[in-house]
C-alpha cells in the first residue's frame, strides 16, 4: 500500500511538472531588411512590418487593425500590412508567451524589420517599445496612451470590407464564395484564408486578420489586381503594313496578349514579309519596330493617247508608273477608236523598266459642205476642240468616233449636230443653215427620241400631270436661243405691254393669242410663210411652213433637256437652279435681261425661270403610248406654259414641270420664245 501511494504521488508530480511547465519567451529585436523593400507596392497608403522567423503558426493581433498578413515559415518571414497609426501588436507562437511590440509612431510608406526567436536567459523581458526609426526605447519612457490599449482577446462579429481595382472580382473566405467586389459583410474576428479571382487577372491568395471591432472603417482590405497579360507594342515601316498575331489581325501600337509564345507576322504588298516567334510574360511590355525590305521593281509607261486605258494582268490601273513584285506581267493598252496593244514585261527587284506605246488610230474620212460658205465650223470631242474651219472641208484620216459639230454665222440659226465617223468610211455632210434675222439667234435642234414627263432625275418633285412618262420621237426643228425681248416685240407690234420695262428684258403680260399674232407678223416681215391661220379657238398651225411659230410642248421639253446632247439635268442646263434660272430664290421679284445665266447643253438660255413660255398645245393629260411629233389635244380650255418664272419656286422651273393659263390671260410671269420647222 505504501509503495503504491508513493507511486501515485510521483505520478502527480510528473503530471504537474508537464502541465505547469514554464512557457518559453519570445525575443523581438530590430534588424536590417533582407531585400524586402517593395512590399508596399500595392498599398501606397499603408505601412508595414516584416518579422524574420522560422516559427510555425504565428498569429498577430493589433490594437489598430492589421490590414493584411503575408508570408509563412516556408519563406522565413511574416509581412504585416498596417494602418499608419500608433499601435500595439501581439505576437502569438505555440509554446511561447505572447510577445508585445508597441509602436509609438508609424508614417505612410514606412517599413520596420524585426527578428523573432527564442529569448535567451538573462535578456530583458519587458515589452519592447519602438519609435518609427526602429530605435528601441526604454520601457520607462512615456508611451502615448493610444499605444497602451488593451489587446482584444475574444472573437466577436466584426465588419469586413474587401475592395479591388478593377471591381467585380469574386471573393472567397476559407474557400467559401462571399460575392463580388466591392464587398462588405460581417464575420467573426480571426484569421482567414482570402482568395480573390477575376478573369484575365492574377489571383490573390493570402491570410488576413479580422480584428474584433464595431468600427466599419476598420478591417478594410484593398487590392490593385494585376492583369494576367503581357503587351506587345509594334510599329512598322511602311506604316500601312498588315500585322497578324497567331493569324489574327493585330494593331499598330499596343496589343494585349496572353502570357506565352506567339507568332508575329508583318506583311505589305511590294515588301518581303517578316515573321518571328515572340514570348510575352505577365506584366511585361515587348517592343518591336519592324522595317520591311522592298520586294518590287518599277514599270514606267509613256502612252498616247493620254487617256488610254491600261490593264496589267487584266486589272485596270490608274497612272503611268507602277511598282510591281518581281515576275512576268501582261500589259494591255487600249483607247476608243484606236487599235489595242498587248505585250509582256519581266519585272525584277530594284529595276525600272520603261516602255513607250503609241496606239494606232482607227480613221475615216469627212466630206463637208455648208451654206453660207462663210460659216465657222467647229468639231469637238468630249468638250475638247479637235478641228475648226470656215465653209467646206475634206478631212482624211480623221479618227473614228463621235463628234459635236457647231456651225455659226451672223443672221443664221446656230447649227449643232452629232457626227459619227466610222473606220474606213467617208461621211458626206451637206448643211443649209436657216436665216434667223430677228430674235437674237436661234438653235438648230436635231431630232431624236426621248422620255417625256416624270423621269428619274426629277426626284420627288414630280406632279401628277407629269405622269405617265412616255416615249416621244421628234423631227428636226429650230428654236430661239433667247426669250422674245421687249425690243423685238416693240419693233413688230409697236407697243410694249410689259410690267417690268427694259429693251433686253423678256416681253411679258402677253396672251397666247397675242404671241400667235406676233409670230405671223414677224413671218410677214421676213417674207416667210405664215404658220397660223384662223382666229379664237379655231386657230390652226401649218407645221410644214417656214414661218415663225410657238414650239409644241414636246419640242419645248426636248430642247430644254438638251436634245441629243442631254446630260439629264433636273433644270435646263444644270441640277443647280441658280446657275441657269431666275426664280423666287434669286430674282428680287422681277424679270432680268435674257442670256445672263449659263445656257443648256445645246446653247439655249433661260428655259428655266425668268418668264413662263407659251407653247402651242392645249393642256391635257398625258397618255402612255409612244408618239411621233405630238401636238397635244385637239381642243381644250387652257394653253400650256413651260419653264417657270421669276416668281416661282425652284420645283416649278424643272424641265418636266407643266403649267397652263387661259389663252387670253395676261401675266407678268408669262412670255414666249420662237420656233420654226425649217
Image (spheres, rainbow, N blue to C red):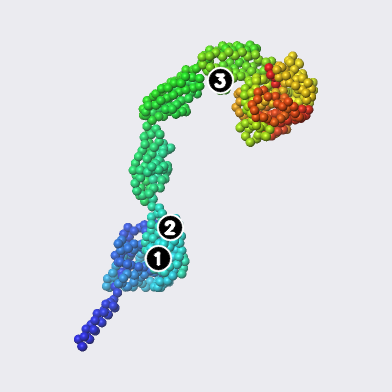
Which residue does the numbered mark 3 point to in the structure image? Answer: 402
Q: Is residue 579 visible?
A: no
Residue 149, by quadrant, is bottom left
Q: Residues within 10 Å of mark 2 (few under 14, many from 20)?
A: many
Decide which of 600, 548 is in the foreground and name it.
548
| Local SS, label 1 | strand
Which residue does the numbered mark 2 point to in the structure image? Answer: 169
Q: Position of residue 3 (x, y in %)?
A: 20, 86
Residue at the spot 60% in from the left edge and 27% down from the top edge: 567
First reached walking from the N terminus: tag 1 or tag 3:
1
Residue at the spot 41% in from the left edge and 54% down from the top edge: 199
Work out whether 602 lies above or below 251. Answer: above
Work out whether 296 lies above or below 341. Answer: below
| Local SS, label 3 | strand
Quarter occupied by the C terminus: top right
Q: Residues within 10 Å of mark 1 (few under 14, many from 20)?
A: many
Decide which of 637, 143 is in the foreground and name it.
637
Which residue does the numbered mark 1 point to in the structure image? Answer: 66
| Local SS, label 2 | loop
Amino acid at each position: 500500500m505504501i509503495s503504491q501511494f508513493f507511486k501515485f504521488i510521483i505520478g502527480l508530480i510528473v503530471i504537474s511538472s508537464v502541465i505547469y511547465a514554464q512557457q518559453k519567451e519570445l525575443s523581438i529585436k530590430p534588424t536590417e531588411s533582407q531585400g524586402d523593400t517593395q512590399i508596399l507596392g500595392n498599398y501606397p497608403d499603408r505601412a508595414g512590418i516584416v518579422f524574420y522567423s522560422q516559427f510555425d503558426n504565428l498569429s498577430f493581433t493589433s490594437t489598430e487593425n492589421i490590414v493584411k498578413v503575408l508570408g509563412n515559415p516556408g519563406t522565413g518571414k511574416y509581412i504585416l500590412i498596417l494602418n499608419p497609426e500608433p499601435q500595439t501588436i501581439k505576437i502569438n507562437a505555440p509554446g511561447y508567451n505572447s510577445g508585445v511590440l508597441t509602436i509609438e509612431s508609424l508614417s505612410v510608406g514606412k517599413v520596420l524589420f524585426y527578428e523573432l526567436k527564442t529569448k535567451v536567459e538573462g535578456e530583458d523581458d519587458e515589452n519592447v517599445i519602438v519609435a518609427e526609426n526602429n530605435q528601441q526605447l526604454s520601457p520607462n519612457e512615456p508611451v502615448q496612451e493610444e499605444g497602451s490599449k488593451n489587446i482584444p482577446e475574444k472573437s466577436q462579429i466584426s465588419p469586413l470590407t474587401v475592395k479591388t481595382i478593377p471591381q467585380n472580382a469574386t471573393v472567397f473566405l476559407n474557400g467559401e464564395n462571399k460575392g463580388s467586389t466591392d464587398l462588405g459583410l460581417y464575420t467573426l474576428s480571426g484569421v482567414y484564408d482570402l482568395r480573390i479571382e477575376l478573369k484575365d487577372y492574377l489571383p490573390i491568395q493570402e491570410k488576413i486578420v479580422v480584428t474584433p471591432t464595431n468600427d466599419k472603417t476598420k478591417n478594410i482590405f484593398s487590392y490593385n489586381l494585376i492583369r494576367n497579360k503581357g503587351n506587345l507594342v509594334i510599329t512598322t515601316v511602311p506604316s500601312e503594313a498588315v500585322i497578324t498575331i497567331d493569324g489574327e489581325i493585330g494593331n499598330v501600337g499596343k496589343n494585349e496578349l496572353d502570357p506565352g509564345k506567339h507568332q508575329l507576322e508583318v506583311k505589305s504588298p511590294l515588301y518581303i514579309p517578316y515573321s518571328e516567334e515572340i514570348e510575352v510574360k505577365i506584366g511585361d511590355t515587348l517592343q518591336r519596330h519592324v522595317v520591311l525590305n522592298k520586294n518590287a521593281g518599277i514599270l514606267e509607261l509613256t502612252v498616247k493617247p493620254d487617256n488610254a486605258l491600261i490593264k496589267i494582268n487584266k486589272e485596270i490601273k490608274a497612272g503611268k508608273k507602277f511598282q510591281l513584285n518581281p515576275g512576268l506581267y501582261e500589259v494591255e493598252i487600249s483607247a476608243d477608236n484606236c487599235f489595242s496593244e498587248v505585250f509582256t514585261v519581266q519585272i525584277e527587284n530594284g529595276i525600272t523598266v520603261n516602255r513607250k506605246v503609241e496606239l494606232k488610230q482607227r480613221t475615216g474620212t469627212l466630206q463637208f459642205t455648208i451654206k453660207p460658205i462663210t460659216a465657222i465650223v467647229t468639231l469637238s470631242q468630249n468638250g475638247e476642240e479637235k478641228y475648226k474651219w470656215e465653209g467646206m472641208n475634206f478631212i482624211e484620216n480623221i479618227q473614228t468616233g463621235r463628234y459635236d459639230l457647231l456651225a455659226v454665222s451672223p443672221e443664221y440659226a446656230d447649227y449643232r449636230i452629232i457626227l459619227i465617223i466610222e473606220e474606213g468610211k467617208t461621211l458626206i455632210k451637206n448643211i443649209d443653215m436657216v436665216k434667223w434675222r430677228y430674235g437674237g439667234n436661234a438653235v438648230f435642234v436635231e431630232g431624236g427620241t426621248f422620255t417625256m414627263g416624270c423621269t428619274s432625275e426629277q426626284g420627288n418633285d414630280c406632279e401628277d400631270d407629269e405622269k405617265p412618262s412616255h416615249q416621244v420621237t421628234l423631227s428636226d426643228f429650230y428654236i430661239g436661243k433667247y426669250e422674245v425681248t421687249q425690243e423685238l416685240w416693240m419693233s413688230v407690234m409697236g407697243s410694249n405691254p410689259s410690267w417690268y420695262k427694259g429693251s433686253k428684258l423678256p416681253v411679258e403680260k402677253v396672251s397666247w393669242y397675242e404671241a400667235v399674232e406676233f409670230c405671223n407678223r414677224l413671218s410677214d416681215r421676213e417674207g416667210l410663210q405664215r404658220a397660223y391661220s384662223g382666229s379664237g379657238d379655231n386657230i390652226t398651225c401649218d407645221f410644214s411652213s417656214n414661218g415663225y411659230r410657238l414650239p409644241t410642248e414636246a419640242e419645248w421639253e426636248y430642247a430644254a433637256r438638251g436634245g441629243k446632247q442631254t446630260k439629264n439635268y433636273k433644270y435646263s442646263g444644270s441640277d443647280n437652279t441658280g446657275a441657269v434660272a431666275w426664280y423666287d430664290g434669286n430674282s428680287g421679284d422681277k424679270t432680268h435681261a435674257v442670256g445672263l445665266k449659263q445656257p443648256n447643253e445645246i446653247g439655249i438660255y433661260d428655259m428655266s425661270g425668268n418668264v413662263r413660255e407659251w407653247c402651242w398645245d392645249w393642256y391635257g393629260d398625258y397618255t402612255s403610248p409612244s408618239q411621233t411629233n405630238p401636238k397635244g389635244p385637239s381642243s381644250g380650255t387652257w394653253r400650256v406654259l413651260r419653264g417657270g418664272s421669276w416668281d416661282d419656286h425652284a420645283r416649278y422651273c424643272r424641265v418636266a414641270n407643266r403649267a397652263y393659263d387661259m389663252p387670253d390671260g395676261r401675266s407678268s410671269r408669262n412670255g414666249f420664245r420662237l420656233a420654226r420647222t425649217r
